[in-house]
Image (tube, rainbow, N blue to C red):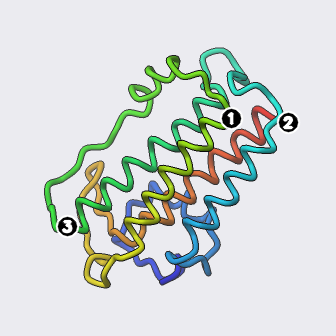
Amino acid sequence: MTRKELQSGEYSSYYDHYLNLVTESASIDTILQSSLEDTIRFINKIDKPFDTTYATGKWSIGEVLMHNIDTERVFAYRALRFMRGDQTPLPGFDQDVFAQDYSNYAFAKADLINSFKATRNATIDLFKSITAKQLISRGVASESPMSVRVIPFLIAGHNKHHENVIRERYLS
């Protein structure tokens, strides 16, 4: 299954921007692994301190990367709930509430990479043995329908979006 095969109604149009950052030919089997490798390369190339911000009141590089990790955890949890047939509507999450706690982190490059790897490997493991029935399972999150099969592409696209933000606003 590729991103191009996703259909209307499997996700909110809110996510179009993230999905458009993932090539149409990307498959569920490869997107999470290739995104993992790309992100690690990207993080390793950052030569600024991870507490760098581009403006007052904006997240630091480390906070943006931690946001990606937290968002992946939320999306993987959604996938798990939907895969298991739980039809309880899931609320959205407030990224700014999550980020309030980020000030407790030192944001060492190696620690962020390890946390990202652990999170991504858990997500890859979740999708490794998914059945065809589970893949087309759907649920409601943030008051919108979402299929399980869109989630790996959303995770990869969300990561790519924030990598682009870091490139454009923090590193240029």
**Residue 7, percent across and down?**
41, 78
Q: Secondary structure at mark 2?
A: loop
On residue 109, the disc is 1
**Residue 27, percent across and down?**
54, 78
In the image, what residue type sits under mark 3? Arg
Q: Nearer the viewer, residue 108 or 157?
A: 108
On residue 172, the disc is 2
Give the distance between the C-alpha atoms of the residues marked 1 and 2, in whole angstroms: 19 Å
Q: Residue at x 51, y 66 (%)?
A: 153
Q: Secondary structure at mark 1?
A: helix
Residue 111: name its quadrant: top right
**10 Å neighbourhood of mark 3: few (<14), some, or many (≥20)?**
few
Q: Residue at x 24, y 64 (%)?
A: 82
Left or right, residue 67 beside residue 160: left
Residue underneath mark 3:
84
Q: Nearer the viewer, mark 3 or mark 1?
A: 1
